[in-house]
Amino acid sequence: MDIHQASTLLGGLSPDQFMKRHWQKKPLLVRQAMPGFKPLLSRSALFDLAGDEAVESRLLSRGAKGWQLRAGPLARRALPPLARPDWTLLVQGVDLHNEQAHALLRAFRFVPDARLDDLMISYASDGGGVGPHFDSYDVFLLQAHGRRRWRIGRQKDLTLIEGLPLKILADFQPEQEYVLEPGDMLYLPPGWAHDGVAVGECMTYSIGFKQPTRDEVVRELLSRVADEADDLVGDMAYRDPRQPATEQPAEIPEAMLAFARDAIERALSEPSHLALLLGELMTEPKPNVWFEPADLGHGGESADGVVLDRRTRMLYDARHVFINGEGFRASGKDARLMRALANKRCLTRAQVAQLGAGARELLEQWRDAGWLHER
Ligand code: SIN
Ligand code: CO
């Protein structure tokens, strides 16, 4: 992608300008970001997905009993009649289940893959929506079918209504209002309050980008460090041959704190090991993802190259490549080709032929696991 080229998707801004001016800073409304856009899945295909156990879905409705939330899987008969107003079905991770949905995300790859979460598709009957709220997500809200009225605001007061099954702002103060038509798109930075209400039946695609938080990163990385503690720092015991006799037996010796601090610093001291753990974490497939192993023993030499499965997460850093939670050290030509695979999500036959024996062996293992396919 040419990040300096003006883009219809971004209302004539280049990806470079968009990132400088809007990303994490201020909303952008783009009329006809995708001119002539047609839904990638029909309403009934979306309802089918919501009924699938492997798919995360939610049904939200508002009626006499107030807000009601029901978690999926949702059989068709669990959904209200289409003519009933004020309900919405949210289907998460559609890019994992549908090739065209996965392909749609390609248009947004001017943002690092490490930030991407998923494509959520919502269906709403007239008046349906999830209420005024804010997300800790950067999101592109692409109108796919019908119309939706968005009201947005910077919102200082983030107090939520108590006792509801979902997060709804108690005192939403919208500043701007737009009605989106099919093909229109609204970018919202994290923290911007928004309320999207269907004007007649509608479908909205949310391309969401997650922000890892400090506490999450600490929890996740340190638990991985803990799993490898023995290898990282060994099991050397605290020793205190110079411990004098004490008259304050309850006092923790300072040397013990120094020992603990030193052990932890040692466990984290190798910068490239932390990079390895981060990459493994960032490529870990979501819990509901599984791969179909390939039929063994066909393809091979005759294949026209390889392409990553849509569910595969592949990233790299200066020293490693990561795929679906596994990290490998890579350098030289192999690293260059593996990076190309991660960026382009495919390699030509000629590129595959240039890989060293070890890297080609890995490719075969990934193919067998269903992480990539021959084409
Ligand atoms: C939607 O209802 O499609 C969008 C949900 C949201 O506001 O985040
Ligand atoms: Co939202």
Image: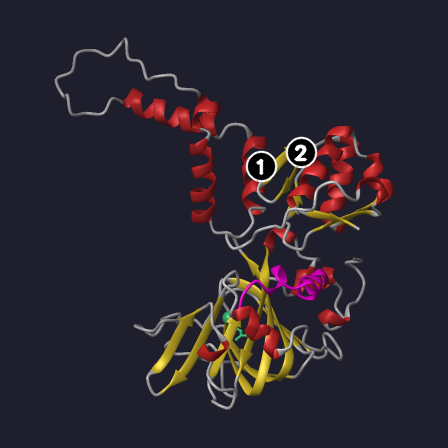
SS state under label 1: helix
Q: How many marks?
A: 2
Q: Is residue 102 magenta?
A: yes
| Direction from residue 348 to residue 373 in the image, left or right | left
Q: Amino acid at mark 2?
A: Arg
Q: Is residue 305 above or below residue 202?
A: above
Q: Residue under label 2, please give it.
A: 319
Say which mark, if any, is on residue 185: none
Return the residue nearer the eye: 62 or 237. 62
Image x and y of residue 167, in percent? 40, 70
| Direction from residue 253 to residue 309 in the image, left or right | right
Image x and y of residue 337, in percent? 78, 39
SS state under label 2: loop
Q: Is residue 25 above or below residue 266?
A: below
Return the residue nearer the eye: 269 or 142. 142
Can residue 131 be seen here? The reply is no
The part of the chain drawn in magenta is 91-106
Residue positioned most to the top: 241
The crowding category of the residue bearing disc 2, from other C-alpha atoms within 10 Å (few below 14, some 14 to 19, many at least 20), is some
Q: Residue under label 1, please give it.
A: 275
